[in-house]
Structure formats: C-alpha cells, structure tokens
C-alpha cells in the first residue's frame, strides 16, 4: 500500500488566459503516505495545482487521476469572511453534504488532535488568529481525507502550536502536500519536494529533506547560469567574427553565413535560467511628526478559562517606543490591538491626532470591494501624487493590471504587500503590527524587518517569528501570558 501511487498528473496543461499556460504537459506522481512540500516562485501556480488536485479546476489537456477516488481535503490559509458569524459547530457542519449524527463527538476528537480548546458554540470570528489556524486544520481532518493539502498552516501559530502540528504530521499515515514559507517547519517532516518551474511550466519531483532539496535546486540553477555564461561568451565571439567576415568577399562571406547559422543554434541552446522570486525594493515608512504620550495602556483583558479577566499594567509609549506583545494563542493579543485601534476602552488609549497604521493579520483594514488603485489612493498623505503612489506600489510588486483588480482578487501574500504599501503612503505616527510576516514570501522579510526597524515613530508589534523579531530593536515588553 505504501508504494501505491495515489495521485498522478499526466501531461497536464492548464491556463487561465489563452496561450498563457501555468502548466504545460506537466507530469508527476505522488505515492500513498508521502509528505511533500510544494515549492515554486510567486505566480508559478501552487494554489492552482491544489485547485486541480481537488477538481475545482479542470485541465485544458492531459489527465489527473486519483487512485480509487481517494478523498481530498484542504486546510486553507484563512477562514472565509462569510464563516465569521457561524458557531464552531455550524462551521464544521458546513463541510458535509449530509451532516453526520455524531458530529459533536467528531468535533471534540478532532479539536483534541489540533490542540484547540474552545467551546463549540463560540463564534468563529471571535477566535484568535492562532485558534483559527487550528480550526482550519481541524476542519480538513474531520473529513478524514486520504490526501491532505495544507496551505501555509503555520500562519498565526505560536511555537507550541507549530510543535504540535509537526508532531501530528510526522505521525499522520496518509498523504500530505504542504505549501509553506517556513523552512524549519518544512524540514522537520518533508520527504520530498514538488517544484513548479515558472519558466518551463513543468513540475519536478525531488526526494530528500527540505534543506537538501533546496540546496540541490540552487546548485542546478548555478550550473545553468554557468552554462549560459559560457554560451554568451561563445555567441559574442561568433557574432564579432560574423561581422568581420561578412564584409569580405567570396569564401569569407559564405563562412560568415555558416557561422551566423551556428550562432543562432547556440542561442537556441541557452538554458532559460530559473530566477528566484523577485524581491520587493528597500523602502522607508515615513513617520508623522508628533510628540507626547502617544499610547497609554492602564489595564488589559486576558482570557483565562475562556473568560476575560482584567489585569493592571502601566505602559506609556512615546515617539521612539517599541512595544512587543507576546503570549500564547487565544490569550487576547489581537483583541487588545483591535480595542486600542478602535479606541473602545478607556484602559487603552491613543493620543488624539495620531495617525494610526494598523496591519491586521486578517487584513480587516482592507476593503475587498475596492480596486487596488483606490485602496492605495484612499490612504494618501498630503503631498503624495498619483505618480509617486504608483512608484511606491511598484516597489511592492504591485504593477500594471493588478491596480485595476479588486482587492479580493489578490493572493494573501499580495494583500500583505498592499498593506505595507499603504503604510508607506499613509505616513503614520503609530504603527500597530499583528503578525506582519504571515503570508509574506521569505525573500521579502529581510527588507520588511529593515524598514520596520528604521521607522522613527511609535510601534506596537505581535509576531510569532523569532528570527523576524530579533531584527527589530524593542524597547518594552508585555507578555499577556505572565499577567
């Protein structure tokens, strides 16, 4: 059984737009019980591949076969907004065409598996980001799939949550395919990699742990670059000779023609080198020129036994203050930030006149019905014109047609980059970050951490990514778990 192929792509071609394929005669197979990482540059088609596997999308050509009709379930990156008002029980029930009679007992078991401890009558939208991440995984598992597809499953999870997920995946006996930018997480259980090549439109299958495969891919790319460099030198040489001999007569002109044909052949033999994902440009978030007690926090609510408890604190943030808020999933970190930004409590206030740049982990500050252009334009600070706005957007890889699309059209990673572009254009006096690295390509994170660290205004930060946090100079700490 372990060697049986459970999923096979045979010469699959898929395109959204005519003559612009994402996959072109792509073939690969996955064996039962495999634990695989799905890799590829931005736009290579990772989410599209998941859609094809599930049957939500159909190939233009080729065959996709699922052995014995193996069941498939996906743990999405984020909970759909339409599900926010459902109770947890209603959310699970919506995954079934026919709701099983023992649904409640199934929910209890699957929530134990993902270490989610909340009442089933709790409203989904009231859960923390980490709790929602566990809920997404539990919702996939309750369907008992033969093939489990995970899309950025570590987003919003604290260390304990990630450790629990790794333990589960190592012990899980069925097939798992994961999209993630968390290299350490992937290396703990990955047995191989499916690599989507954005240039060849093929899918390459590598065997080995995540770091070994990444190293193998990078070495291959380097070999391709060296081969191209040698060919470029040879082509340049030949072109110079062709140019010299073509001005001669008789046999020399014939030689020039022959060499020209050989040069064309050499150019055709060049390898189309796979480039790394484009990285966003270095950027600066200008700070509003404002002074005083920017933020005052006297009391905070923490969740103990599913009930809010008020705790005394004494935090006053000035212009150069940087506060890191920490604590386990579900303790109340994101709720504190939302309450602060909305000015809903006398116990946590922002000084009047402060322009707040709030990066919400669920992109609640974005209007999904706006165009990307309008979303950017809506936050422009005085003195910034449309031309400068477009230039800022381009630095975050938001160009061309994307500006005319609705925000809802963007991937989660693009929504994150749009949010950073808005912060640059806003020029805030207070930055409030709730998991700003979620959904962000790892190549962008050093650029983002540098910009955040150089910001000269007041800052409040929540992040479960230690390597990101260590790049930020923090002046004050608030651990809700220790209150």
Image (cartoon, rainbow, N blue to C red):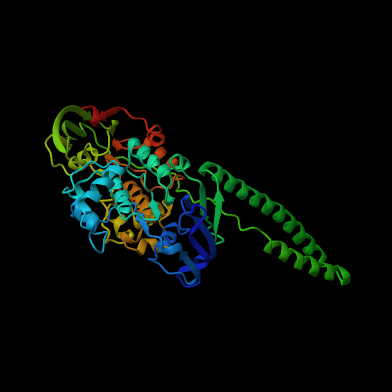
* Residue 22: image location, x then y, percent: 49, 64
142 up-or-down from 435: above or below:
below
Q: Is residue 358 visible in the rendered structure shown here?
A: no
Name the foreground residue: 323 vs 183. Answer: 183
Q: Quick check: 75 left or right of 314?
A: right
107 up-or-down from 351: above or below:
below
Q: Residue furthest front?
A: 1
Q: Quick check: 264 left or right of 324?
A: right
* Residue 234: image location, x then y, percent: 75, 56
Displayed quadrant of residue 322: top left
Q: Residue furthest right?
A: 251
Q: In the picture, which quadrant includes the C terminus?
A: top left
Displayed quadrant of residue 371: bottom left
| Count of picture labels | 0
Q: Residue at x 57, y 61 (%)?
A: 200
Name the foreground residue: 456 vs 9. Answer: 9
Q: Is residue 371 visible in the rendered structure shown here?
A: yes
Q: Quick check: 252 left or right of 261?
A: right
* Residue 364: image location, x then y, percent: 25, 51
* Residue 268: image location, x then y, percent: 68, 64
Q: Residue at x 39, y 47 (%)?
A: 440
62 up-or-down from 186: above or below:
below
């Amino acid at each position: 059984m372990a060697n049986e192929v459970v999923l096979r792509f045979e010469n699959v071609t898929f395109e959204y737009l005519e003559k612009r394929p994402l996959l072109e005669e792509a073939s690969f197979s996955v064996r039962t019980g495999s634990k695989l990482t799905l890799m590829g540059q931005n736009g290579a088609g990772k989410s599209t591949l998941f859609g094809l596997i599930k049957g939500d999308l159909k190939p233009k050509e080729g065959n996709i076969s699922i052995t014995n009709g193996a069941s498939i379930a996906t743990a999405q990156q984020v909970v759909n907004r339409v599900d926010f008002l459902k109770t947890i029980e209603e959310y699970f029930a919506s995954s079934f065409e026919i709701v099983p009679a023992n649904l409640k007992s199934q929910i209890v078991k699957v929530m134990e598996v993902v270490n989610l401890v909340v009442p089933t009558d709790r409203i989904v939208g009231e859960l923390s980001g980490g709790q929602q991440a566990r809920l997404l995984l539990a919702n996939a598992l309750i369907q008992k799939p033969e093939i489990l597809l995970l899309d950025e499953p570590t987003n919003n999870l604290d260390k304990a949550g990630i450790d629990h997920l790794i333990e589960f995946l190592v012990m899980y006996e069925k097939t798992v395919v994961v999209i993630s930018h968390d290299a350490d997480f992937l290396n703990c259980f990955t047995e191989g990699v499916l690599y989507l090549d954005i240039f060849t439109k093929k899918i390459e299958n590598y065997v080995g742990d995540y770091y070994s495969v990444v190293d193998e891919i990078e070495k291959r790319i380097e070999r391709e670059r060296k081969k191209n460099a040698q060919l470029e030198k040879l082509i340049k040489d030949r072109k110079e000779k062709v140019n010299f001999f073509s001005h001669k007569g008789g046999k020399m002109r014939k030689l020039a023609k022959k060499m020209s044909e050989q040069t064309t052949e050499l150019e055709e033999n060049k390898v189309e080198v796979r480039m790394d994902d484009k990285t966003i440009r270095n950027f600066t978030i200008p700070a509003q020129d404002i002074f005083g007690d920017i933020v005052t926090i006297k009391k905070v609510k923490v969740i103990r036994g599913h009930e809010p408890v008020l705790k005394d604190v004494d935090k006053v943030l000035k212009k150069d203050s940087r506060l890191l808020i920490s604590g386990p999933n579900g303790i109340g970190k994101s709720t504190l930030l939302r309450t602060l930004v909305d000015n809903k409590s006398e116990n946590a206030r922002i000084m009047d006149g402060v322009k707040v740049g709030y990066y919400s982990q669920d992109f609640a500050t974005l209007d999904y019905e706006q165009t990307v252009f309008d979303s950017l334009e809506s936050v422009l600070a005085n003195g910034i014109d449309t031309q400068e706005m477009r230039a800022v957007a381009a630095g975050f890889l938001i160009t061309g047609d994307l500006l005319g699309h609705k925000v809802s059209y963007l991937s989660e990673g693009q929504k994150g980059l749009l949010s950073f572009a808005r912060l640059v254009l806003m020029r805030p006096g207070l930055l409030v970050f709730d998991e700003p690295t979620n959904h962000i390509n790892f190549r962008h994170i050093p650029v983002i951490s540098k910009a955040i660290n150089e910001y000269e205004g007041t800052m409040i930060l929540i992040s479960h990514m230690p390597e990101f946090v260590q790049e930020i100079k923090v002046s004050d700490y608030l651990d809700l778990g220790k209150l």
